[in-house]
Image: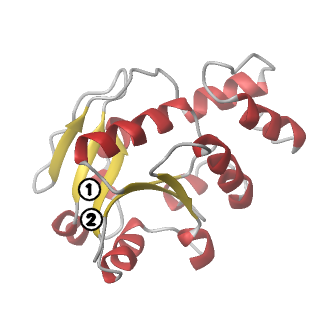
Amino acid sequence: MGQRIGLFGGTFDPPHAGHLAGAIAARSAFRLDRVMFVVANDPWQKSNHRPVTKAHHRLAMVRLLVEGFDGIEVSDLEISRGGPSYTMDTVKELRDGGHEVILVVGADAAAGLDSWDRSDELRKLVEVAVVDRPGYLFPELNGWRLNRVKAESVDVSSSGVRDLVSGGASSSDSIPATIRSYIDLHRLDWS
């Protein structure tokens, strides 16, 4: 028998406290069996605009982020598949396994759902948990089953963390120390 899975896909470059707070809130609000952080292999909507950290590093950092949180796990489905990462392919794979899929996205990403690959098909297959983000309004999109998820207010973004790290500033409120250590150890550079 399948599970109710929250599919939280993304670039996670790097993952941060807001991602984790959103996953925890969505799991509770939707009574999900588990939330899967699915790390994009090639995030095609971003990789054409800026350099993206190699997938194996982003995967390792997400594993550090979710360590010790029950019902929150990490998946390398899209990395193993290779090539550009399309949420629709991952949804189909999970549904073929008999699972119900709830798409978990931040309010910022939700506003762009219509631009996603095969969005017409995707909107018919998933319910969407839209996690509140400071500074972003709940989107109004036709045809999508959108549900607001109130999460612990964490005003952080991956681009903000990249800026802090590049500038040598403290990132302690944004990412766990284990992730900052990983970034420093592997000399990940976003400058």
Q: Residue furthest bottom?
A: 96
Give the x, y percent position of residue 100.
26, 68
Residue occupying image coordinates x 52% and y 61%: 44
**140 relative position to 106: left or right:** left
Q: Amino acid at mark 1?
A: Asp
Q: Amino acid at mark 2?
A: Ser
Give the x, y percent position of residue 191.
78, 33
Residue occupying image coordinates x 79% and y 38%: 183
Q: Which residue is mark 1?
A: 114
Q: Earlier in the sequence, mark 2 or mark 1?
A: 1
Q: Which residue is mark 2?
A: 119
Asked whether the residues under the numbered discs 2 and 1 touch, taking CB atoms below 8 Å apart as contact, a structural biologist would say yes
- The local secondary structure at tag 1 comes to helix
Do we see residue 39 in this rendering?
A: no
Image position of 165 with respect to 49: above or below: above
**121 relative position to 47: left or right:** left
- Answer with the quarter of the image where residue 106 lies: top left
